[in-house]
Image (cartoon, helix red, strand yellow):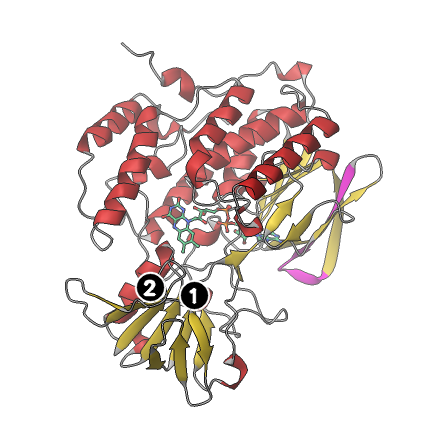
């Protein structure tokens, strides 16, 4: 019999008196900030979470509101945090998505979404439950934006915040450490398109896409090939005259008509070569389309407008660095850390491992290598990216080694790593998504793994909560 995984779910019980309790500021109360707050408090730290919005959940709090600048490039625009569209269902099954000791299972309540790949509201409610279950709301200052976080003398961090109640007054406080959990799906990254300034059509980023209706009977060119590009193109194709997808993964010379169940108005192209004053869009395969809208589903940029590290941490071509294991800047560790920078991963469990490591490093229970050793590790990592021709903006894409990374963190923390069923289910879902891009959320073949997950969940205490 394999050893019971129950041990895994027991809260860490460090003899806190031996270790330091720090004053820690957490920026953001999305999934990353919530689990960071829980782990920091479990370790004995004093935690204040700053959250700009009036509720927890970050990205998962859907709003029909969009920004005044549809491209999201005007720095003076009013920022809308979430990029979710109304029809969004998770692209991961709920079993793998949830926190390790707080399974994302259906509650069975009538107002909840029991589906395996639920709609966004269900995720937002799960995160709310998590916050209530672990008493995290009392740590959070809602409607309070961090406008500045910077190193002051004696390894202390100054944090200036602005509350919604009194936007004119900045409150300044000192902390021992800052954990940055501000998310990275808000600041749009745009494709460069020759001729765009004179192109007469509408031009927007998926950050400001919510519902298909405004695209009724229009010809839409959508740039991008990632999960949300696929979802949004299918959403819009239900009402649009035609949807033309321009993707890097399509070779020049190929113009392919996509056909699905009810969808026969979608076309696949290589990237856009240029756009013209007469409204046409020219692709690299020479095909030409007269379009009404160009929709960039081209991803996002890391953005830390509040953070002052005197140049120690920079964002260069979407590489945040230098960071040891994508978390600690070697020269500022453990006082400054980042949770959740990685992408193409299982986010919530990874946030949990990262947070446990940060909490332990701050108390001194877990040792970090010397600054020189951490810098050497970062340099070796960058060299390995160069050697494999990985572009700089893929630095935080951990697709192929995420479980190795999680397991490394777990080892540092002295806890078991990712469950085997979770790894296998993640892989099974990825395969299923390829085979059934339009149906993977409702048809699957990994029932055996679902059973394993349920058995594991049954061994957790109800909702895993109560062990602040
Ligand atoms: P966020 O959820 O973005 O939270 C950041 C928080 O920080 C926000 O509440 C924000 O208000 C706050 N904040 C920002 N700046 C400040 C400031 N200066 N002061 C105070 N507060 C601040 N993940 C999955 O697991 N499954 C999926 O199916 C999935 N689908 C996705 C679909 C889309 C379209 C997108 C964009 C993401 C998806 N993700 C999915 C990834 C998702 O982003 C993560 O699951 C997770 O929600 C990220 O959490 P976070 O806490 O890092 O960031």
Element class at badge 1 = helix
Give the x, y percent position of residue 247: 38, 63
The residue sitting at 36% across, 25% down in the picture is 419
Magenta stretch holds residue 152: no
Picture layout, residue 48 above or below residue 252: above
Identify the main secondary structure in magenta: strand
Magenta stretch holds residue 165: yes
- Is residue 377 at all visible to an observer of this figure? yes
Disc 2 within 8 angstroms of ligand 1 (CB):
no
- The image quarter containing residue 451 is top left
The residue sitting at 69% across, 54% down in the picture is 306
Give the x, y percent position of residue 282: 40, 78
Give the x, y percent position of residue 270: 37, 66
The reply to whether the C-beta atoms of the residues labelled 2 and 1 are less than 8 Å apart is yes
Picture layout, residue 206 above or below residue 35: below
The label on residue 206 is: 1
Disc 1 within 8 angstroms of ligand 1 (CB):
yes
In the orientation shown, which residue stands out farthest toward the right? Answer: 153
Towards the viewer: 440 or 138: 440
Position of 326 with respect to 17 (left or right) is left
Picture layout, residue 338 above or below residue 169: above
Element class at badge 2 = helix
The residue sitting at 26% across, 48% down in the picture is 434
- The image quarter containing residue 98 is top left
Towards the viewer: 172 or 267: 267
Crowd around label 1: few <14 · some 14–19 · many ≥20 (10 Å): many
Magenta part of the chain = 156-168
Residue that numbered label 2 is attached to: 232
The N terminus lies in which quarter of the figure? Answer: top left
């Amino acid at each position: 019999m394999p050893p019971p995984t129950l041990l895994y779910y027991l809260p860490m019980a460090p003899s806190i008196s031996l270790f330091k309790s720090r004053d820690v500021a957490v920026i953001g109360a999305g999934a990353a900030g919530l689990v960071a707050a829980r782990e920091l408090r479990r370790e004995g730290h004093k935690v204040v979470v700053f959250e700009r919005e009036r509720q927890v959940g970050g990205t998962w709090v859907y709003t029909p509101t969009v920004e005044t600048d549809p491209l999201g490039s005007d720095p003076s625009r009013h920022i809308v945090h979430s990029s979710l569209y109304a029809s969004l269902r998770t692209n991961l099954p709920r079993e793998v998505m949830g926190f390790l000791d707080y399974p994302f299972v259906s509650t069975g309540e009538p107002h909840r979404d029991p589906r395996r790949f639920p709609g966004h509201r269900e995720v937002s409610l799960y995160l709310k439950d998590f916050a209530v279950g672990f008493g995290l709301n009392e740590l959070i200052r809602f409607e309070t934006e961090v406008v500045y976080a910077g190193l002051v003398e004696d390894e202390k961090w100054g944090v200036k915040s602005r509350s919604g109640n009194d936007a004119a007054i900045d409150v300044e406080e000192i902390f021992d450490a800052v954990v940055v959990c501000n998310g990275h799906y808000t600041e749009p990254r745009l494709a460069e398109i020759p001729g765009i300034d004179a192109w007469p059509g509408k031009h927007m980023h998926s950050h400001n896409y919510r519902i298909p209706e405004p695209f009724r009977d229009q010809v839409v060119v959508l740039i991008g090939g990632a999960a949300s590009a696929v979802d949004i193109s299918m959403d819009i194709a239900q009402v649009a005259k035609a949807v033309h997808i321009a993707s890097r993964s399509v070779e020049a010379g190929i113009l392919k008509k996509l056909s699905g169940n009810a969808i026969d108005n979608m076309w696949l192209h290589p990237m856009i070569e240029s756009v013209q004053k007469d409204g046409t869009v020219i692709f690299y395969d020479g095909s030409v389309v007269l379009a009404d809208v160009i929709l960039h589903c081209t991803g996002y940029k890391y953005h830390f407008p509040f953070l002052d590290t005197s140049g120690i941490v920079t964002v260069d071509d979407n590489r945040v660095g230098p960071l040891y294991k994508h978390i600690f800047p070697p020269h500022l560790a453990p006082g400054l850390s980042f949770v959740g920078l990685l992408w193409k991963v299982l986010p919530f469990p990874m946030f949990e491992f990262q947070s446990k490591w940060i909490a332990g490093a701050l108390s001194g229970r877990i040792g970090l290598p010397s600054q020189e050793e951490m810098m050497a590790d970062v340099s070796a990592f960058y060299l390995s990216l160069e050697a494999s021709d990985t572009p700089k903006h893929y630095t935080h894409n951990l697709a192929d080694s995420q479980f190795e990374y999680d397991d490394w963190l777990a080892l540092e923390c002295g806890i078991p790593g990712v469950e085997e069923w979770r790894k296998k289910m993640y892989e099974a879902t990825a395969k299923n998504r390829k085979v059934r891009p339009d149906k993977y959320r409702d048809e699957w073949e990994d029932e055996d793994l679902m059973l394993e997950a349920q058995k594991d969940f049954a061994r957790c205490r109800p909702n895993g909560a109560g062990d602040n």
